[in-house]
Image (tube, rainbow, N blue to C red):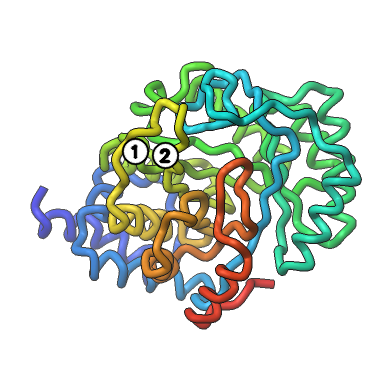
Amino acid sequence: MSMLVSMSIIESQSAASVHASSLRHDWTRGEVRALFDLPFSELMFRAQSVHRQNFDPSEVQISTLLSIKTGGCPEDCAYCPQSASYDTGVRAEKLMALDAVLAEARAAKASGASRFCMGAAWRSPKDRDLDSVRAMVEGVKALGLETCATLGMLTAAQARQLKDAGLDYYNHNLDTSPEFYGRIITTRTYEDRLETIGHVRDAGIHVCCGGIVGMGETRADRVGMIATLASLPAHPESVPINMLVRVAGTPVADEPTLDPIEFVRTIAVARITMPRSMVRLSAGREEMSEETQALCFLAGANSIFYGPKLLTTPNPERDRDRAMLDRLGMSAME
Ligand code: SF4
């Protein structure tokens, strides 16, 4: 498709989302592809315009992520060092004790986090485990933090129980496009993912849902992923965009590094198509230059994970992040 055709296809979208910030849920792949194909400066201008209409561009929301149950996962997500299918050196551990989780949550709050995310390497939680997680949610909430959990697939009843405990957000990523999904995960389907997201939404919990790029997918797959997210009945309130962290022992460990500009484009297209969502610059920041991160903020990313570890993979130290945000004149969102 020529650049001129690409630009004319998105003309009507531009009027809708840039000028009126209306939310659309009918994004076609052609429209999303046309955004990806824009000249970089044009794409950045549009993404920044949408961002400024909906958010203060100098603010970033800060979340902290804790692995409350590490390793030994029966799922086979090709990017994940916690899958029992791969030999990555991550040992299976038991569910953390409530007191230990609350101590981490207090420390996260003291470091400026407004949301505390708890991740467990399960296919889906057993009822006994869910009781323990509910106690954690109640305890973290009582500290004055927003709560988020990622525990695998949920039934409708489990989602309601978590809502009753005070859970604000549930993370369940689509990971990639429907077409590429089978290359990354074989132990559950795209439809399984969508079903859990539906249960979470129906229970009244905010949805945190995004994906990972750099796993060997094509631009068409990145288009498919964003088009699917932006066409959900309600846009996820949080959209984490992860750059693959290549871990030795996982099937995607030797994938070539994705061009950082293509990563920034993915953030920009997420911002334009989901104007009011928090777009999170998520995993992969440890290997990313501060210049690339700055471009991501310009493209509309307005959320990061803070703290030296993202589940089992490294993340920038808090001091380094603080210095970067200071350098960029950005501050933590209340
Ligand atoms: S991403 Fe989650 S579900 Fe997949 S293997 Fe890792 S811990 Fe298990």
**In this picture, residue 215 sits left or right of residue 31:** right
- SS class, disc 1: helix
Above or below — where is 58 with respect to 314? Answer: below
Residue 269 visible, this orientation: yes
Visible residue check, residue 20: no
Q: Is residue 285 left or right of residue 29?
A: right
Of residue 191 and residue 185, the one placed in the foreground of this image is 185
Few, some or many C-alpha atoms within 10 Å of disc 2 (few <14, some 14-19, many ≥20)? many
Q: Nearer the viewer, residue 262 or 18?
A: 262
Query: Residue 200's x, y, as percent?
Result: 67, 37
Residue position marked by numbered label 1 in the rendering: 224
The answer to whether mark 1 and mark 2 are in CB contact below 8 A is: yes
Q: Is residue 142 above or below residue 43?
A: above
In depth, the one of 193 and 126 nearer the eye is 126
Specify the label residue 228 is tagged with: 2
Q: Amino acid at mark 2?
A: Thr
